[in-house]
Amino acid sequence: MTTELICAGFGGQGVLTIGKFLAKAGMTEGKNVSWLPSYGPEMRGGTANVSTVISDDAIASPIVSFPNILVALNQPSIDKFAPSIRPGGILIYNTNMCPHGCKREDIVQISAPMVDIAKEIGNPMVLNMLAIGVIIGKTRIIKYETMEEDLTSFMKAKNPELLELNLKAIKRGIQIAQG
Amino acid sequence: MAKILMKGNEAVAEAAIRSGCRLYFAYPITPQSELIEYMARMMPKVNGTFLQAESEVAAINMVYGAAGCGKRVMTSSSSPGISLKMEGISYIAGAELPCVIVNVQRGGPGLGDIQPAQGDYFQATKGGGHGDYRLIVMAPGSVQEFADMASEAFELADKYRNPVMILADGMLGQMMEPVEFKPAKTDAEIEELGKQHHSWCIHPNEDGDKKHHNEINSLEIDPLVLEKHVNELYEKYAVIEQKELRYESFNVYDDNEILCVAWGTASRIVKSAINELKAAGKSVGMIRPINVWPYPYEAVAKAIGPKVKKVYVFELNTGQMLDDVKIAVSGKVPVDFWGKVGGIVFTPAEIQAKLEECF
């Protein structure tokens, strides 16, 4: 199986990190992965996006034309990428910054006021972890345990408090996905 | 060793250090910045030398000097910076010195932009600097291959006493994929590697024979001497052309109706399109040259199956490897080309559409 994701939003919302942790967890689970960021002047305060592929097979193109999953943290990301989601694919978006949503009916849409929820959890920075939680809860392309393990080895020593908030946000995301 | 998720720029730097590279001279440029940053961070930890030169011209001449001492030395840059290094590269090739040069290509000509491109194929494989010389040019298609090529490039450079270029691009540099590294060479092994070059390189005189010395030079003012030297270089290149051909065959079968030829980043995208077409019952094969000089002409010619109506070349330029494919195909079947320029990378969907038009 091959899952192709695009994560997009404003620079600073942590979209590149969503892709990075998913790719890393996929690698830990023995899958083939690739992570390709947009880079260049458009990242400074503008929009950022990352293509991530997680696959049981060798990965051909790391560039994703038709994603199975789109994470859109702002409206321009929906406008740009939602039309190319594969039919039956998943759109995950942040209603705080996507006032117009998406009109497609042939895809699964999961939305939540992610900015509000992140603040409620205790740190606006965990917004991207909410999105990771939704992906884990809805698709199981990677296991929660793998993500917890990776995050713990990455953050436990450096910032144990933020680690706890991140894990809380991922669990909340899983709840959102499972309705 | 466990796999590590790493950018191509960092992976090639780590692999170079593990291969015994302890000298690195360069000047920063996007999109290869992570490479020079990694070297700045890691070289002091292995008692190596990292030096940010005052310019690309200075950096390549530092490489010239270090290579003349028989040490494993590397430099890296991106397209405009590589152009600046070309004079030095010609000198290094003329003086027959081993070194590794990494080009993480960006859009050109001129300063161009900072997005991935393949516009330096001519420069890398057909010259770039002045005079009759050749670089061995390796074109990675993944982060793992980019890393593996660092050690292979040093081996080839030593074997033939010739500069080797790794021709990557902004996508391979910026992309992260899992990488597995080979064990690092020990200090004793690196010392031994240097000693293997004592017959020709500049080194401290150990036997006390003050009359014996080696010279490093690319100037031969006597035409008869230069003629002999260039002919000897070409004998060496002829051996490389026989022994160092590398390519990948992807989905090449007798029922192929189209044969694609693509290298580096472009080949990854073409592979996706071929997989999609395969699922729809359409047979398309691909040859991916891994070394782009020497070029696998015969492999391209042999891959043209009985049903192939067209050879289709896809590159992120206006058709540079295309010339080599035409030489390989020798008019047997039509050769078509499609590419994107300006640092814009084509998508699998675009390639698929181009290929579908042929059925």
Image (tube, grey):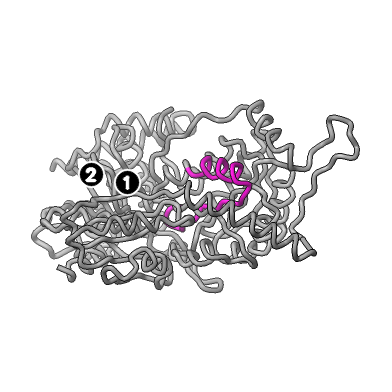
Residue type of the residue flagged with mark 2: Ile
The percent coordinates of residue B91 (x first, y second) are: 69, 59
Residue at 53 percent across and 49 percent down: it is: B239
Membership of B156 in magenta stretch:
yes
Q: Which residue is mark 1?
A: A118
Depth order, front residue of B55/A81: B55
Membership of B178 in magenta stretch:
no
Mark 2 neighbour class, 10 Å CA radius: few under 14, some 14 to 19, many 20 or more: many
Q: Are discs 1 and 2 less than 8 Å apart at CB?
A: no
Residue at 40 percent across and 71 percent down: it is: B319
Q: Which residue is mark 2?
A: A135
Is tag 1's residue or tag 2's residue first in the polypeptide sequence? 1
Q: Quadrant of residue A161?
A: top left
Q: Quadrant of residue B221?
A: bottom right
The percent coordinates of residue A31 (x first, y second) are: 28, 37
Q: Which residues are magenta?
A: B149-174
Question: Is there any visible trace of residue A151 in the rendered image?
Answer: yes
